[in-house]
Amino acid sequence: MNVLRAKTAGFCMGVSLALKKLDTALAHGTCRRIYTLGPLIHNPQVLSLYAEQGVVCADETQHFSVNDCVVIRAHGIPRSLEESLRSSGVRVIDATCPKVKKAQLAIARATREGASLLLFGEADHPEVRGLISYAAGRACVLGTSAFSAPEIPTDLGLVLASQTTQDRAAFLELEARVRAYDPNVRVLETICDATKERQEEVRAIAGQVDIMVVVGGRQSGNTRRLADVSAACGIETVLVETASELRAENFAKKRCVGLTAGASTPNSVIDLAEKWLAAL
Ligand code: SF4
């Protein structure tokens, strides 16, 4: 089988930085215990390797002692949670992706006079909960590009932003609808280039292959959206976490397969999928 592997497949800058911070904390050995607040990234294979090294994935109900280190995940956490962590005296290692942090601060600045925030994203995604917490005024999450008058006050202005990993084309559609409702809406550019590049490359590859394989964690929003973008190109798309989930019958009569991966998928996992496909 011919395999066309995306050049952008694999760790993005934010994931690499977060893992580097965790590796440094492990190497220093000065923390009584290292916790991550929620999964550091959305990839179960990577997380289980760190769990074997003693890293504990905790939630906000966890009691930390002052000699513990708490790593803030790449998606960021709600503002109040970060403030209470810092005031509790534990050592906080902020591994929030710089692009997520930039989006959080842009939302805080744009809404500080009370403007309401419309956020394009998945309401139950940790990044979205974090972004919303930076809005000074009212906020609501829009899950699709369909739009009707918001159920929040708009008299102090309207700000539109997006979860960093959303599809840019869908966001532009939403922007046009919101602008028709309020021509003065302030639009923040918060979609990450890493996501855009991966999605554009999937669209380019989709025209050259018979089927697409997307490798990544099922909890990973950007992985799921890569699969959606591929399917929307009209190409049969298979999403797997590891090569062990690939099934030969899905590739019968196919000559060329596209291979891409989410921003939190390690190269070693993509390499195994490529090897499996090439051997067909
Ligand atoms: S996809 Fe973009 S925003 Fe998300 S962690 Fe990676 S670099 Fe940061």
Image (spheres, rainbow, N blue to C red):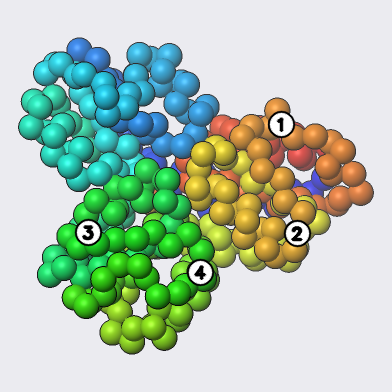
Q: Amino acid at mark 4?
A: Ser
Residue 40 seen = yes
Depth check, front residue: 129 or 46:
129
Quickly name the residue at label 1. 245
Q: Amino acid at mark 3?
A: Ala
Quickly name the residue at label 3. 135
Q: Position of residue 226 (x, y in %)?
A: 58, 54
The residue lying at 45 percent from left, 81 percent from top is 176
Residue at mark 3 to residue at mark 1: CA–CA distance: 41 Å
Q: Classify 10 Å Cα crowding around label 1: few (below 14), some (14-19), many (20 and above).
A: few
Q: Classify 10 Å Cα crowding around label 2: few (below 14), some (14-19), many (20 and above).
A: some
Q: Name the image quarter holding residue 240.
A: top right
Judged from the image, the secondary structure of the residue bearing numbered disc 2 is: loop
Depth check, front residue: 178 or 25:
178
Q: How many marks?
A: 4
Quickly name the residue at label 4. 145
Quickly name the residue at label 2. 235
Q: Which of the marked residues, 1 or 4, is nearer the chain's N terminus? A: 4
Depth check, front residue: 53 or 238:
238
Q: Classify 10 Å Cα crowding around label 4: few (below 14), some (14-19), many (20 and above).
A: some
Q: Which of the marked residues, 4 or 2, is nearer the chain's N terminus? A: 4
Residue at mark 4 to residue at mark 2: CA–CA distance: 22 Å
Q: Amino acid at mark 1?
A: Glu
Residue 25 seen = no
Judged from the image, the secondary structure of the residue bearing numbered disc 1 is: helix
Q: Name the image quarter holding residue 208.
A: bottom right
Q: Classify 10 Å Cα crowding around label 3: few (below 14), some (14-19), many (20 and above).
A: many
